[in-house]
Amino acid sequence: MVKAIYPGSFDPCTLGHLDIIKRSSALFDEVIVGVLNNSKKNPLFTVSERVNMIKELTKDMPNIKVMSFDGLLVDFAREVDVHVIIRGLRAITDFEYELQIAQSNKAQHSEIETVFLTTDIHYSYLSSTIVREFASYGGDISSFVPKEIIPLVEEKYRNINVKGDKDGQ
Ligand code: PNS
């Protein structure tokens, strides 16, 4: 039985992420989507919101498990006894960064293998940062995120903008 971890911030989960999750689920017996609880960043969605969002999106995929993790990815991999890490590659700029991380993870944990899946061409420009940027200005994000995620992102920015208006009074 070959298990894999697909780690990320997923703030929020995009159509590109979901595509990688679906394709990974066909390649591995079990895929753990590892949602990073990064205390250094100030995410739009809390870690439990991000976990629940991906659980909802993958509810019909029996071999997908969604978990959050703190700290180093290699420590999480040891904890769940998984030796394969999946990452999506969009462009050459991703490759340089991802190669460095894959090699440093391997230096820390020699049994770890990183598998790269090339992002579907439709989503090669897409990132959570792009989603947040467009949504923060009220832009249309329907071609960026699964339809279930649209109202959640819009709601976040409505609250942020209302709070901003109040604070700016
Ligand atoms: O979706 P992202 O933000 O590109 O995902 C990055 C992630 C979560 C895979 C990476 O930041 C990570 O593994 N963080 C955990 C801390 C860690 O292991 N750092 C060393 C490798 S960067």
Image: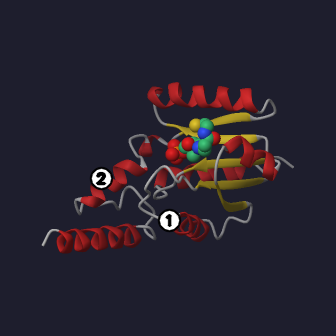
User: Which SS class for mark 2?
Assistant: helix
Q: CA distance from mark 2 to mark 1?
A: 18 Å
User: Which SS class for mark 1?
Assistant: loop
Task: Pick whichever, 32 or 119, lies toward us.
Answer: 32
Task: Pick whichever, 68 or 29, lies toward us.
Answer: 68
Q: Residue at x 81, y 33 (%)?
A: 111
Q: Tell me if I can see residue 47 in this picture.
A: yes
Q: Nearer the viewer, mark 2 or mark 1?
A: 1
The kind of residue tagged 1 is: Thr
Locate residue 116, reporting x and y percent: 62, 35
Label 1 Cα crowd, 10 Å radius (few <14 / some 14-19 / many 20+): few
- Image position of 125 with respect to 23: above or below: above
Residue 37 placement: quadrant: bottom right
Q: Tell me if I can see residue 117 in this picture.
A: no
Marking on residue 61: none
**Is 87 positioned to the left or the right of 44 in the image?**
right
